[in-house]
Amino acid sequence: MRSHGWGKKWRIRFEPTKSQLMTIAHQRHRWPIMDLTFGDHTVSELSEVKLLGITFDSGLSFKTHLHNTALKASSRLGFLRKAARVLDGAGKRTVYRGFVRPVLEYAPLVWMGAASSHLRLLDRVQRRALHILGPDVLLQSLAARRLVAGLSYIMYNLMCLAGPPQLTSLVPSQLPPRTFLRTRSDHSVCHESQLQNVLPASSPDYVRRCFPYSIIDEWNNLPPTVLQSPPRLTSLQSFKGKVHQHLRQSRWYWATDSL
């Protein structure tokens, strides 16, 4: 490996036994991989690798990661159940938001393209939490919160703050400015920062579900009132609030509607 030769040149010693190899492919059996050596050590190929708290599998299905996430969040429901005996609705909601939900929402842009059958594992945890919190406590659906997170990242971190080129290059180009005309049958006006849908129609479903392609349509359908004229945004919290207000018109916005 090049890093081994680089380390020898600059007198930096690596630990070959801690190196891992994983081939990312949906049809791994069709792609034979030669043995990879690091110095005198042969790096073994793994089907799953954990990086910064995210378990990546060779097919990027995130099945194992979401399964483990659901188990971890479920284990915290016991504390919520005990706390619910002495807290009112606001207190129970605060405990859930600060102790349970962060587990369900760690780095969602990475795995939000997982199959719905895997994402439902997280929804089931929130459903159990709703039974503990009681009928008077409303919670936004996890799908709605993931959508807001994705829209906020595109808008604020990449477009307004001009993030790192490695990330901004992943965002599709904007559509050219157009003149929008109102008619009696069409009273909608689109904003001027619409993005192109660069994926071909033949793209697999698992690609279309990934960020940012899965939310391009939602981004393009945002009303102009959400994206103010330049400077479009004064604060990230302001943008999130407007998006939440816009999504409240959707039936699946609340967890009780989506489950």
Image (spheres, helix red, strand yellow):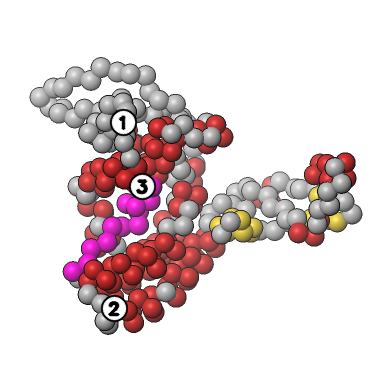
Q: Residue 249 carries which label?
A: none
Give the SS element for disc 1: loop
Residue 163 placement (x, y as % from top left) = 49, 35
Q: Is residue 251 visible?
A: yes
Span shown in magenta: 136-149
Separation (CA) of disc 1 from disc 2: 41 Å
Crowd tier of the residue under label 1, counting other residues whose Cα lies within 10 Å: few below 14, some 14–19, many 20 or above: some
Q: Which amino acid does label 1 sit on?
A: Arg
Query: Quadrant of the image for the C terminus?
Result: bottom left
Q: Which amino acid does label 3 sit on?
A: Leu
Report the residue marked by disc 3: 147
Counting residues from the N terminus, which is met first, the one under dot 3 or under dot 1?
Answer: 3
- Residue at horizontal 55%, vertical 57%? 54
Left-right relation of 18 to 58: right
Counting residues from the N terminus, which is met first, the one under dot 2 or under dot 3?
Answer: 2
Crowd tier of the residue under label 2, counting other residues whose Cα lies within 10 Å: few below 14, some 14–19, many 20 or above: some
Residue 34 placement (x, y as % from top left) = 80, 48
Counting residues from the N terminus, which is met first, the one under dot 1 or under dot 2?
Answer: 2
- Residue at horizontal 13%, vertical 22%? 183
Give above or below for 239 relative to 125: above
Q: Which mark is residue 84?
A: 2
Report the residue marked by disc 1: 232
Left-right relation of 229 to 123: left
**Residue at the farthest left position:** 184
